[in-house]
Image (spheres, grey):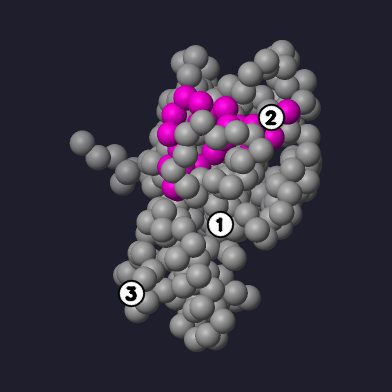
Amino acid sequence: MKLVTFTHKNETRVGAVIDQAVVDSRGDSIMPSTMIEFLASGAASLAAMQQLIAGGSHRIPLSEVKLLAPVPRPGKYLAISLNYADHIEETGFEKPEFPTFFTKQSSCVIAHNDAIYRPRVSDKLDYEGELALVIGKRCRHVPVDKAHQVIAGFTIANDVSVRDWQIRSPTWTLGKSFDTAGPLGPWLVTADEIGDPHNLNLKTWIDDELRQDSNTRHMIFNCYEMVAYLSQAMTLEPGDVIATGTPSGVGVKMKPRGYMKPGQTARIEIEGIGTLINPVLEEPDELTVY
């Protein structure tokens, strides 16, 4: 299933995309209204959604809804650094002995077609096309060979980075957490439809220029190893997002630098999931709040 969080007539709820329509969960007393609650309820919500799909009704044209990020405000948004050999080579860093994670604050999350704002404090706005996994079960100390059981599904992430702010802190958090620096979407594809997440083509374009062209089989630490490693330190919960790293081709390593500029569009495509598209705009003055 392609699960979505969407808004229609000023109401936000969970649905599933079939062809060019959203199967609407409204009116189903079993169906939670948020993706985190939906995932936490496990098999019951999935079965209810399957019944709605099979029923053939409760459809809204996709053009009439506003898609939000699949998980609009995850409890945790974790991302791994230096997880593709070619990206490590272009950065000049050493291959890590252990997975190295940083945090993106959940307030950075935006949806497919939402604008990425180039902040007024920096012009070093970069893209990173990534596969992201979403946790479906509360879990701790998960063995690698059981980790697939706690993954609800997969989506596309653009780990937008403000490079000069990123290097100001060893944790990278500030440069990774600017408002609009977390595009996710357009939907969450359930794990059963993806099968093996470690053989998916991944491509990133800025406008019509192909910048990244790789495959998830080139990950150093795979999805299951990441889940197992993180769960040794913390309880993972439904709706938590883990971005699995970016391949080579990021703007900061281009000559000249290939930072995103207002008027451009970032487009990331991952096989089996779809395409995440976000225009780039200058940060508007009206966002100033104090």
Mark 2 residue type: Phe
Residue 8 at x, y percent in the picture: 39, 72
Distance from label 1 to label 3 (Cα)? 22 Å
| Residue 119 in the image: above or below residue 92 | below
Who's the residue at 46% across and 16% down the image?
Answer: 169
Q: Residue 97 is drawn in which quadrant?
A: top right
Q: Residues within 10 Å of mark 2 (few under 14, many from 20)?
A: some
Residue 29 at x, y percent in the picture: 33, 74
Who's the residue at 69% across and 55% down the image?
Answer: 194
Specify which label sits upstream in the sequence, 1 or 3: 3
Mark 1 residue type: Leu
**Closer to the observer: label 1 or label 2?**
2
Q: Is 290 within the magenta?
A: no
Q: What is the number of the mark on residue 221? A: 2
Image quadrant occupied by the C terminus: top left
Q: Is 226 within the magenta?
A: yes
Residue 235 at x, y percent in the picture: 43, 34
What residue span does the magenta drawing correspond to?
Answer: 220-242
Q: What is the number of the mark on residue 29? A: 3
Q: Residues within 10 Å of mark 3 (few under 14, many from 20)?
A: few
Mark 3 residue type: Ser
Who's the residue at 45% across and 65% down the image?
Answer: 44
Relative depth, front residue between 174 and 273: 273
Distance from label 1 to label 2 (Cα)? 22 Å
Q: Secondary structure at mark 2?
A: loop
Relative depth, front residue between 75 and 51: 51
Distance from label 3 to label 2 (Cα)? 41 Å
Circle 1 is placed at which residue position?
Answer: 188
Residue 279 at x, y percent in the picture: 55, 51
Residue 174 located left or right of residue 145: left
Q: Secondary structure at mark 3?
A: loop
Residue 278 located left or right of residue 74: right
